[in-house]
Amino acid sequence: MHPATDALIVIDVQNDFCPGGALAVQGGDEVVGTINAAMNDFVCIVLTQDWHPHDHASFAASQGAEPFSTAMMPYGPQTLWPTHCVQGTEGAAFHHGLRTKPAQMVIRKGFRPDIDSYSAFFENDRTTATGLDGYLRTRGVTGLVLAGLATDYCVGFSALDAVRLGYRVTVRLDACRAIDLDGSLKAMLDQMRAAGVRLDG
Ligand code: VGL
Ligand code: ZN
């Protein structure tokens, strides 16, 4: 059992990131059993949910561009994704095998039409807060264990922001799967190691 000062943060284990989904991550559904088991070891459990309007700026279709191309946004370069995790759709729902009852907080992100949010803490402008930091601080949490989808995007950006905010951070690689676009997995693993994220599993 982890002390109450540690939280398990489960990132985006949603149908669209699992096989058959709109932005399927290879083996995405394989993380479910490991994450369900890990929930037994934590007092504080948070789920995140990618939660976009249907015409979100990060969607290739909204920009008349090819999926996986890059667009310049006011906040910097942004990968354009296939339409995914649209609010209220089955694709945005949690994988049906994921235990959701033990979670005390669900943080939704990416709901502002013009800005994407990979990290559970800050949107892609790196300054608009999601509120998760305040929630964890007021619960006295100082250590985080991250798992979910995808290693090289939402898990990785969350881990880097968490270190920046002063948390001790572990990423459970055995409970994560990656998109791996143009070497993005190796780049993110290198960045996480350099930032002091503990890579486990
Ligand atoms: C994610 C790309 C777009 C993720 C979310 O959960 O890693 N990746 N939206
Ligand atoms: Zn998204």
Image (cartoon, rainbow, N blue to C red):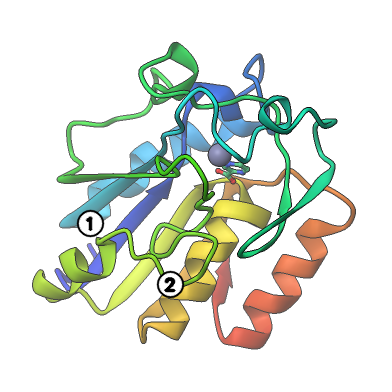
Percent from the top left, x then y, of residue 162? Answer: 42, 74
Q: Is residue 129 left or right of residue 60?
A: left
Mark 1: which secondary structure?
Answer: loop
Gap between marks 2 and 1, in whole Å?
A: 29 Å
Q: Quadrant of the N terminus?
A: bottom left
Q: Quadrant of the C terminus?
A: bottom right
Q: Earlier in the sequence, mark 2 or mark 1?
A: 1
Percent from the top left, x then y, of residue 98? Answer: 37, 28
Query: In terms of image quadrants, where is residue 127?
Result: bottom left
Local crowd size for mark 1, using a 10 Å CA cut-off: few (<14), some (14–19), many (≥20): some
Q: Is residue 186 left or right of residue 200?
A: right
**Which of the numbered marks, if any, corresponds to residue 127?**
2
Q: 21 above or below 133?
A: above
Q: 161 above or below 20?
A: below
Disc 1 under 8 Å from ligand 1? The reply is no
Local crowd size for mark 2, using a 10 Å CA cut-off: few (<14), some (14–19), many (≥20): few
Q: Is residue 136 left or right of residue 138?
A: right
| Amino acid at dot 2 | Thr
Q: Residue at x 50, y 70 (%)?
A: 126
Whether tag 2 and tag 1 are in contact, CB under 8 A, the answer is no
| Amino acid at dot 1 | Phe
Q: Nearer the viewer, residue 183 or 72?
A: 72
Mark 2: which secondary structure?
Answer: loop
The image quadrant where one finds ligand 1 is top right
**Observer able to see residue 201:** no
**Which of the numbered marks, if any, corresponds to residue 7?**
none
Q: Which residue is mark 1?
A: 42
Judged by depth in the image, the label closer to the viewer, 2 or 1, is 2
Q: 87 above or below 167?
A: above
Q: Nearer the viewer, residue 137 or 59?
A: 59
Percent from the top left, x then y, of residue 161? Answer: 47, 74
